[in-house]
Image: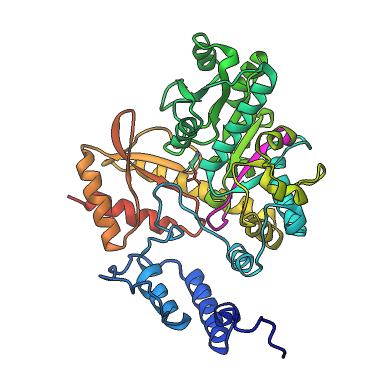
Amino acid sequence: VAEPYLDGLRLPETMHRPEPEDWKLALEVSEWAMERLTDRRSTFPPRRWPDQLPPIQAEGVGAVAAWDILRDDVLSTALPSDHPRYLAFVPGAPTVAGVLADMAVSAAGIYAGSALEGGAVVVAERAALRWLADLAGLPDTAHGTFVSGGSTANLSALVAARHAVKARTGRQPSTILVGAGAHSSISAAADVMGCSVVFAGDIDGRFDGTALRTALAGVDRDDIVAVAATGGTTNTGAIDDLASLADVCREHQLWLHADAAYGGAALLSERCRHRFAGIEQVDSLTIDPHKWLFTPFDCAAVIYRDAAVARRAHAQRAPYLDAVNGDEEDNPADYATHLSRRARGIPLWMSLVANGTDAYTQAVDACLDLAEYAADRIEAGEQFELACPPSLSVVVFRRRGWVRADYERWSAAARRSGLGLVTPTSVSGAPALRFCFVNPATTIMDIDLLLDSLSRHR
Ligand SMILES: Cc1ncc(COP(=O)(O)O)c(C=O)c1O
């Protein structure tokens, strides 16, 4: 083969072209991946951290040695969020097809910001977004993109809302009206945008049209960026009254955003769907497939009722981008505060195609069953009480008589012993523990183990 490079100029091709040992290593990494997905229980608790990782230096150690270190000293120390007794925060439990697609996306070298480069990758992501938009009952004009997380999705939606209001009033609005139980990312987005937040309603309750009307009384309507509601709060799973909020927003021409990052998956369940009534009227929506839709991190959807409005807010213009910015182009980069992006919707798309949506409904229902079982056991046990009514797959509860330090001690002991990850929170100003079920591989035995340990703990 002719040497393709100019005299004296050699690419470090051993870094970019697989050598025979890399082919062997690829099989080893794949086997490791499949073993890990087969047994997601034994990877908890993490091993001790190494005192020192190898230095990054001029001479490399080779991929085989680097993989050994990555596998044994780095990956093994993380708390895997798909362990069946990882019930803290909002865990994730990716499907096998989703993980395989994610691995392939890395190897395919895809820039998924533009239709020109992404090809049918953009079409497949669009199909996954359409499925999510249909779940919420949004019209044909609805579209968006996948971003890294619910935080970026919320920020992108609020930026689009601000742009739309400014286009209508000629003035840059600066106030975001938020239900008191909203996720912290809404306030963080307001900070980034230089906006202020007005909280409405009660932190442990549902934000509704009446609370919104009260909050509106003190605010200049043209200064409002958006009303941000939540479809499944992180702390308690509460779902805001989206229908009454939509009524008030329509009356006052306000942009309604629903953050259903965690709870949106429950739209799949006949048991929960009705609780989201009004979601079909929102102007923008966040749903995170990396939470309760079994997709590897990181994958969050931001969807706009009228995608053209979002494009006007987000599309970046530069001479070097003219090649991809045709008027008719549907560029995923144009719907959020990003430009370069991973094709992070592809794992969701492949998993939906592979498993079918019925499997998703069943898996979501299985998590709801787990939450019901946990709530029943808690109510039946004399030592325990529910801290608030369970909602979606979140169960917040107390051990009677415990103070925050007791919860913290038990939580740390459970983590260190490998029992699981369950962390304290607070509801109505008092400490509590919180289970969040998004992993259909969790069993009632897992719940029993955790509650039995809590009962015994002194
Ligand atoms: C309701 C809600 N919104 C937003 C977020 C933030 O999502 P992310 O961590 O993906 O940025 C979360 C995270 O738990 C959430 O539960």
Q: Is residue 32 visible?
A: yes
- Residue 429 percent across, percent down from the top left: 30, 29
- Residue 455 percent across, percent down from the top left: 25, 49
Outermost residue, top direction?
Answer: 217
Say which of 347 and 390 sits in front. Answer: 347
Say which of 190 and 72 sits in front. Answer: 190
- Residue at image coords 42%, 79%: 60
Say which of 186 and 398 sits in front. Answer: 186
Task: Please tell me whether residue 455 is drawn above or below residue 137 in the rendered image.
Answer: below
Task: Please tell me whether residue 72 is drawn above or below residue 87 in the rendered image.
Answer: below
Say which of 175 and 184 sits in front. Answer: 175
What quarter of the picture does the N terminus occupy?
bottom right
Q: Is residue 277 visible?
A: no
- Residue at image coords 41%, 43%: 376
- Residue at image coords 33%, 28%: 428
- How many discs mark residues in the rendered view? 0
Say which quarter of the image contains residue 268: top right
- Residue 456 percent across, percent down from the top left: 22, 52
Which stretch did the figure color magenta? Answer: 294-307
Question: Is residue 358 part of the magenta span, yes or no?
Answer: no
Relative placement, left or right, of 99 versus 355 is left
- Residue at image coords 64%, 56%: 348
